[in-house]
Amino acid sequence: MPDLPAGPPAPPIPLTELLAREELGLRSIAGPAEAELLWVHTSEMADPYPYLLGGELLLSAGVLLTDPDTYVSRLVEAGAAALGFGVRPVHETVPAELIAACDRYGLPLIEVPPETPFTAIARAVWRLMAEARMRELRRVTRAQQALATAAARTDPVPAVLHQLAAQLDGRAALLTADGEELHAAGRAPAPDVRAALTRLARVVAPVVRPAPASATDTLGTTHLAAYALGGGQGLVLTLATKRREAGDHTIAGVAVVLLSLLAAPHQGVDAAGRSAALVRLLLGADPAGVAPLLGGAQLWTVVHARRDGGPVDPLTAGALGAALGSALVDAGRGRDAVRVLVPGGDRITPQPGWTLGASAPAAITALDVADAQAGRALGHAEATRTPLAHHRTDTGCGLAALIPQEAAEAHARALLAPLTETLAETLRCWLSLHGSWDRTATALQVHRNTVRQRIARCGVLLETDLDDMDVRTELWLALRQE
């Protein structure tokens, strides 16, 4: 996981801001008026090239200026940002040959009046840099707070990416090492930008050894960046922005730390796929064959879940599994319910942002029954708009307890024999929701007219009046034996 820098570096100062300082009396007389200054340097050497780092505003009175063309070409070669030329006492005016050379090579040339000391210019640049750094620190601090707030939401990974894209005014996406996009925020990039981001992600992908923690590139006017997430999840954060400010790397670093922490409790993408396959196997395989895979847990609770207002991916499903205390998670497909196998018989608790249905605790020999119970409980929760519904296990008390179990089960089989499994499940759901067509349709995820047709068919096959409360009561008791 990358270390967070203490703060953003001092951003470059636009030359126009320095020229706007009226007390300095500076005047642009050649070359472009726009440049970015990283620092100030004073030199009277005939060739200061060996002592320049690039990005300087070089101040000189032209003491040893003999060949303006060579002098300017060497400054440009060294990467100087601009030349400030002080008139008097050496030169009464800026030499015409120097003006022509700066225009020819595209180097900004600033005339410094005799009453303005070079130290005053340096002091002004440092003051502008301090002000810019303070502005950048405030921006980074606001961004850090916004990202931390997003990380506390019920959908933290998408929320952090959305906030990051907003703070950097660009595109933020979470990719696997293979380039699969798990989450993204911001305007979708052009195909060539997307392809470039995928290539950049492979550069920092943890599967590549050795791999850098980050990488940057440009494509036209678009700035690209990729950051490897910590935790061995094989995930990469990619960014595409129209500009690159001094504090952007710090903001991205905060997002990388948060996303790494958010992904750490989850399984890697490959592991999530294996876990999903294992869950599907466990819920449909021979109990004797899967018992060794489940360790020593005697009871298991099956949970079906749907995320409120959004699709589900392996990371989001993994977060739910971590919250419920299980790594056995099947994220499903599209609007399919997420299925989680939770060891033990403890009561499941509601989870923010999810609607849950929980089975009764079951032994491994009854996981298929528990899976059906969890599905019905989820349907009931969605129909009644409650965050969590448990399968009811009170068949052994009340009036039902007065009937011998074997006799009750035999009567139920005989009474419900004419019904198919689909019709019986529809009748069970309809009765549990007090005959509500709309709630039953919601619970079963079918149209309300389909519910009406199925219930009508049940009435015909059972040769009874389903509006009769006595009939409903008898059928409900029979269905509870199933």
Image (cartoon, grey):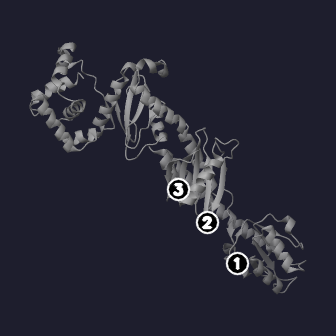
SS under mark 2 = loop
Residue 330 seen in this snapshot: yes
Q: Which mark is residue 285?
A: none
Q: CA distance from mark 2 to mark 1?
A: 20 Å
Kindly identify which residue carries mark 2: 221
Residues at badges 2 and 3 in contact (C-beta under 8 Å)? no
* Image quadrant in which you'd find residue 446: top left
Callout in the foreground (2, 3): 2
Q: Report the front residue among 24 and 358.
A: 358
Instruction: Give the residue type at disc 2.
Output: Thr
Q: Is residue 14 above or below residue 450?
A: below
Callout in the foreground (2, 1): 2
Instruction: Give the residue type at disc 1.
Output: Pro
Kindly identify which residue carries mark 3: 165
Tell me what residue is drawn at x 88 percent, y 82 percent.
90
Residues at badges 2 and 1 in contact (C-beta under 8 Å)? no
Q: Report the front residue among 438 and 199.
A: 199
Instruction: Give the residue type at disc 3.
Output: Ala
- Graded by Cα atoms within 10 Å as few (under 14), some (14 to 19) or many (20 or more), the crowding at tag 1 reads some
Circle nearer the N terminus (2, 3): 3
* Image quadrant in which you'd find residue 73: bottom right
Q: CA distance from mark 2 to mark 3?
A: 17 Å
Q: Report the front residue among 368 and 21.
A: 368
- Residue 345: x and y, percent? 39, 22
SS under mark 1 = loop
- Residue 358: x and y, percent? 35, 30
Q: CA distance from mark 1 to mark 3?
A: 33 Å
Residue 325 seen in this snapshot: no
Kindly identify which residue carries mark 1: 32
- Graded by Cα atoms within 10 Å as few (under 14), some (14 to 19) or many (20 or more), the crowding at tag 2 reads few
SS under mark 3 = helix
